[in-house]
């Protein structure tokens, strides 16, 4: 009986030690997993913030590009009205196209995207029917002056809508 008792005691000690190891191992494993999850979440937050800042900077760069394209178009169309050089007209058309492309990228996925067909129609009119567009130069200048000041000005797009209709006639 004493041999059997020693065997039971040894088994109990073994089980107890094994239980402590497993409990300690599980605790350590849970701590490690928690630490890994925490570090992963922090890293994801840092990456998200960096991408968000980059997107915000891209958006302001697109806004500046659209505004400078509109300002350049206004300047060149003004020069064409004053001097009559064809190169100024075609430079204005190219600058309008630069404005149009930047505006398209700037408004992608926003409610302002509804104005993009107006820009395309006006650009098409400037490109395909330059004689008719030259007849409407004051309207072009009004719209470009407003856009040069603020590319999101709804009044400018009202002018572009009227201009688009006039160029299609």
Image: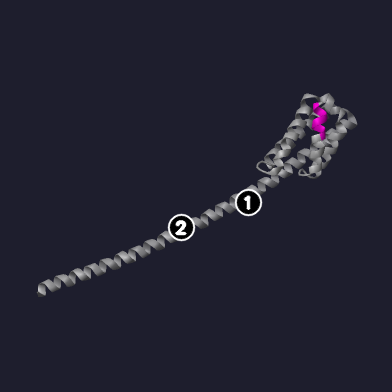
Quick one: quadrant of the N terminus? Answer: bottom left
Place residue 75 in its image quadrant: top right
User: Between marks 1 and 2, how big is the CA–CA gap?
Assistant: 24 Å
Q: Main secondary structure of the magenta part?
A: helix
Q: In the figure, 31 relative to 150: above or below?
A: below
Residue 78, visible in the rendered structure: no
The residue indicated by pointer 2 is 37
Q: What percent of the width, then of the height, locates residue 84? A: 88, 28
Which color scheme does this rendered protein use?
one colour
Q: At 26% across and 66% down in the image, what residue appears?
A: 18
Q: Nearer the viewer, residue 11 or 162?
A: 162
Q: In the figure, 115 relative to 133: above or below?
A: below
The residue indicated by pointer 1 is 53
Q: What percent of the width, then of the height, locates residue 12? A: 21, 70
Q: Residues within 10 Å of mark 1 (few under 14, many from 20)?
A: few
Q: What percent of the width, then of the height, locates residue 44? A: 52, 53
- 165 part of magenta stretch: yes
Q: In the figure, 21 relative to 112: above or below?
A: below
Span colored in magenta? 162-168
Residue lying farthest to the right in this orientation: 82
Q: At 67% across and 40% down in the image, what residue appears?
A: 105
Q: Secondary structure at mark 1?
A: helix
Q: At 84% across and 24% down in the image, what residue appears?
A: 131
Place residue 81 in its image quadrant: top right
Q: Nearer the viewer, residue 46 or 83?
A: 46
Left or right of residue 116, residue 156 in this image: right
First of labels 1, 2 by sequence position = 2
Tally of numbered discs: 2
Q: At 14% across and 73% down in the image, what residue appears?
A: 6
Q: What percent of the width, then of the height, locates residue 80? A: 86, 31
């Amino acid at each position: 009986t004493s041999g059997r008792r020693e065997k039971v005691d040894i088994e109990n000690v073994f089980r107890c030690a094994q239980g402590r190891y497993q409990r300690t191992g599980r605790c350590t494993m849970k701590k490690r997993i928690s630490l890994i999850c925490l570090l992963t979440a922090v890293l994801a937050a840092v990456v998200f913030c960096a991408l968000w800042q980059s997107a915000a900077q891209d958006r302001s760069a697109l806004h500046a590009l659209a505004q400078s394209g509109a300002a350049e178009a206004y300047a060149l169309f003004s020069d064409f009205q004053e001097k009559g050089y064809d190169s100024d007209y075609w430079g204005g058309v190219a600058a309008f196209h630069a404005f149009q492309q930047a505006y398209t990228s700037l408004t992608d996925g926003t409610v302002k995207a509804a104005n993009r067909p107006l820009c395309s129609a006006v650009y098409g009119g400037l490109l395909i029917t330059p004689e008719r567009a030259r007849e409407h130069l004051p309207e072009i200048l009004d719209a470009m002056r407003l856009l040069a000041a603020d590319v999101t000005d709804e009044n400018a797009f009202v002018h572009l809508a009227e201009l688009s209709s006039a160029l299609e006639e």
